[in-house]
Structures are given as C-alpha cells and as structure tokens.
Amino acid sequence: MGEKSINKGDCDATGCIRLEADKLLIRGNHSGNRYIEIYVGAPAGIGEFKISSENRIELCRGRGYENKVFESVSYTCYGCNAAYPAGSITITRFDGPGGYVEGSFKTMLAEKGVWKEQVPLEGTFKVYRER
C-alpha cells in the first residue's frame, strides 16, 4: 500500500522478525492498528513458497477501515473448504543474525470471515535479523 515499515527485532510496537523451528514470521506494524504479517512454513530459507496454509499473508487495514483483516485464503461459505489463491512469497536473501531477510510477495487477499471477491496485494520486504 506504498508504506514502509521499519522492523526492530523482537515483537514490539514497531514489528518483528521471528524464526521458530525453521518457520519464519515477519510482522510490520503501522499507526492506527495497521499491520502486515508474512508467514513461511518449514523449512524457511531462500526460495519461492507458494501460498498455502503454511505460507500465507495477513493484512489489517486499521481503525480507519473498521480494523478489517484480510488474508491469503478464501472460503465460498461458512464451513466450506479453504481455497488458496495463486501467488507466492519469495525469499531472495536469508542471512544469519546480524544480516537481513529480504524478498517479495504477490497474492490475492479476501476479508477474513467474509466471503467476498479477492483483491490483489504485492510488495517487497527487507528486515534486519538480530537473532
């Protein structure tokens, strides 16, 4: 959405990058309760990760948009099976502590809990890895 998030290590008000058992979580926070979360399932590293239940994106538009949350999964009805859109998360740099994790993403998002048309989302990220 044309905004830049500066992530500062542990999950605090500014955002975070977290590795847990080879899984990766990147979270960027903005004012007004806006955030984006990028998840990559095991094993996280350099490569292209197709959107799935393990590799996904969540976006909150914030208070100005009634805190609506969008995710890279959709359902045609309550209780229906999940459908994952075309798209991927690509990691082009995956340094150890003191380095960076860098990449891009492109997918479609649907409002969480509402079965409506999906909207496109794409972007890039570069986050410093403290640990």
Image (cartoon, rainbow, N blue to C red):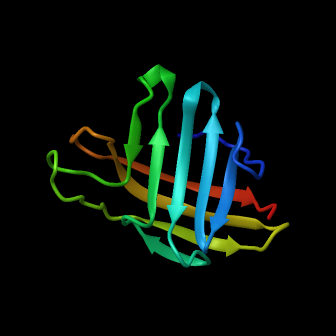
Q: Quadrant of residue 21?
A: bottom right
The residue lying at 32 percent from left, 54 percent from top is: 73
Q: Nearer the viewer, residue 97 or 105?
A: 97
* Rendering coords of residue 36 (x, y %): 54, 45
When the figure is inspected, residue 46 is found, relative to residue 70, above or below; the finding is below
Residue at image point 38% right, 64% down? 87
Q: Is residue 123 left or right of residue 119?
A: right
Q: Position of residue 64 (x, y in %)?
A: 48, 20
Q: Residue 99: percent from the left, percent from the top?
A: 81, 68
Q: Is 40 rendered above or below residue 60?
A: below
Q: Is residue 118 left or right of residue 58?
A: left
Q: Residue furthest right?
A: 98
Which residue lies at the image location 69% right of the left edge and 58% below the top edge? 126
Q: Is residue 98 left or right of residue 15?
A: right
Please state the total of marks drawn on the protein image: 0
- Say above or below: 103 vs 96: above
Please indicate whether residue 96 sits to the left or right of residue 80 in the image. Answer: right
Quadrant into which the C terminus falls = bottom right
Q: Residue 8 or 19: which is nearer the viewer?
A: 19
Q: Quadrant of residue 128?
A: bottom right
In the image shown, does 65 or 2 lie closer to the viewer? 65
Q: Whole-percent x and y of residue 54?
A: 43, 67
Q: Quadrant of residue 72?
A: bottom left
Q: Residue at x 56, y 39 (%)?
A: 35
